[in-house]
Image (cartoon, rainbow, N blue to C red):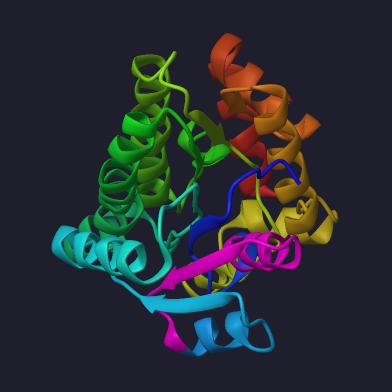
Amino acid sequence: MAFHGKLALVTGAASGMGQLSAWRLADAGATVAAVDVNEEGLARTVAGRANVRAYRCDLAHLEDVRATVERIRAELGVIDRVTHAAAIMPASPLLAMPIEKIEQVMRVNYDGTLHIALTTLPEMVARRAGDLILYGSLAGEVPTPHLGAYNASKAAVNRFAEVLIHESRGSGVRILLVCPPMVDTPLLEQAQQGSNPRSIQIGIEQGRLAKPDVIVTLAEEAIERGDEIVFPTREASVLHALRRFAPRLLWKLIEKAEAS
């Protein structure tokens, strides 16, 4: 475990990599503020762990985030790490998705990122200590049919995080952007309940979904090494390179997969 502080705030803590991160930090002895809008999932996260506290918060709303962060500080103390894993991923062709839904994806995924980062990072910078782990996505680099709204939101998250990292160098705070590929978490269920993109079907059929515990471990190793941006699997690195150096080839491969 690369965490050397006492109090960690974890978003998206009701399921998936957020929940796993909260459990790992708690089992390593940290006090964890588990943040999510899903109260039922939060109840499962805190069950049996006295050092995990649940905080319901809608990250899309700045005032809710500010109030929650202040409450955590008042009740638990100085925040030493923030792990931001919260996101939503509805799937649909863009022309079939209501504008309001596309805007919601951006509010939760992108606005939520800037809300949590910019309400917690300044205090860390002032102390010259702390960790900020932001979960972007390979989907922010590699476009995917039926996931256009999610692609756009994660592209915004990735670029926001990249600039934040560069502007914060020398601040004493470790900041890491993690860009995983498809991960076997409940987030995929949202897409499957929508238009069920072929890319996800293929990933499941071929056993290519990354395991959440592997991604969380690789993120811990990356922040301990001092990495700033990590594509934590070989597949993620290859697809990122294709997008950068051979985008037309990548689109041909995507179109071939969609037609299969």
Compared with residue 179, is residue 191 higher up or lower down, i.e. above or below? below
242 drawn magenta:
no
Q: Give the range drawn in magenta.
A: 18-39
Q: Which of 85 and 10 is in front in this view?
A: 10
Question: Can you tell which quarter of the image residue 230 is in?
Answer: top right
- Does residue 191 show up? no
* Percent coordinates x, y for residue 62 in the rendering: 17, 58
Image: 154 above or below 198: above
33 or 45: nearer the eye? Answer: 33
Q: Where is residue 113 in the image (x, y as percent from the top left)?
A: 34, 47
Q: Can residue 81 be seen in this view?
A: yes
Say which residue appears at 38% left-offset and 33% top-offset: 127
Please, which residue is most extreme toward the top here?
245
Q: Is residue 248 left or right of residue 208?
A: left
x then y, percent, for residue 98: 22, 65
Residue pictured at 76% horizontal, 35% vertical: 221
Q: Residue at x 30, y 61 (%)?
A: 69
Can you say whether 42 is above or below 8 in the image?
A: below
Quadrant for residue 43, please give it. bottom right
All told, the count of numbered labels is 0
Instruction: Provide residue 46's location: percent of width, then percent of height.
Output: 59, 82
Residue 19 is inside the magenta segment: yes
199 horizontally vs 100: left or right: right
Q: Which of 258 and 63 is in front in this view?
A: 63
Residue that extends furthest to the left in the rendered view of this protein: 63
Which residue is found at the position 75% from the left and 67% from the top? 27
Q: Is residue 80 left or right of residue 67?
A: right
